[in-house]
């Protein structure tokens, strides 16, 4: 489902009626800040997951030093 230009204009008009033109900049700023924090949190979570996977691989390969890779 895609939103065309007509639908976007209707949504913008409804938002302006609900919040008023004076509060829109504050609302947009708070939405932007929230999106920035959400992206940072998801990036941090993915980085932590990658670090955990890397340490798991390191511990798996170092647990049995008698075996050689490829044999």
Image: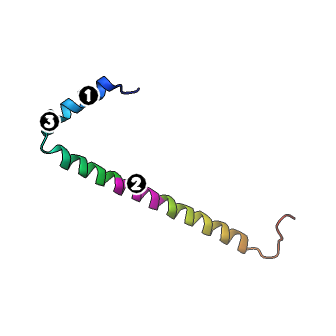
Which secondary structure lies at badge 2? helix
Tell me whether circle 3 and circle 2 mark residues in contact (CB < 8 Å).
Answer: no
Foreground disc of the pair 3, 1? 1
Write down the residue under mark 3: 18
Q: Earlier in the sequence, mark 2 or mark 1?
A: 1
Nearer to the camera, 20 or 65: 20
- Whether residue 44 appears in magenta in the rendering, the answer is yes
Q: Earlier in the sequence, mark 3 or mark 1?
A: 1
Q: Residue furthest top?
A: 6
In the image, what residue occupies the spot 78% across and 76% down? 65
**Residue bearing mark 1:** 9
Q: Is residue 53 above or below residue 7?
A: below
Q: Is-magenta flag for residue 16?
A: no
Instruction: Give the residue drawn at x 83%, y 70%.
Output: 68
Instruction: Magenta stretch: give its range.
Output: 36-45
Name the image colouring.
rainbow
Report whether 41 appears left or right of 67. Answer: left
Element under label 1?
helix
Q: Earlier in the sequence, mark 3 or mark 2?
A: 3
Residue 42 position in % (x across, y down): 43, 56
Instruction: Work out whether 49 lies above or below 4.
Output: below
Cα distance in 3D space between marks 3 and 1: 14 Å
Q: CA distance from mark 2 to mark 1?
A: 27 Å
> Which quarter of the image is occupied by the C terminus?
bottom right
Residue 47 placement (x, y as % from top left): 51, 62
Q: Are marks 3 and 1 in contact (CB under 8 Å)?
A: no
CB atoms of marks 2 and 1 within 8 Å: no
Task: Give the residue pinned by disc 2.
Answer: 39
Disc 3 and disc 2: Cα gap in Å?
27 Å
Q: Quadrant of residue 36?
A: bottom left
Q: Main secondary structure of the magenta part?
A: helix
């Amino acid at each position: 489902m895609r939103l065309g230009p007509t639908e976007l204009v209707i949504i913008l008009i409804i938002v302006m009626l609900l919040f008023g033109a004076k509060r829109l900049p504050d609302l947009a700023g708070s939405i932007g800040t929230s999106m920035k924090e959400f992206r940072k949190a998801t990036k941090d979570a993915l980085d932590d997951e990658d670090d955990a996977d890397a340490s798991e691989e390191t511990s798996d390969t170092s647990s049995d030093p008698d075996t050689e890779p490829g044999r």
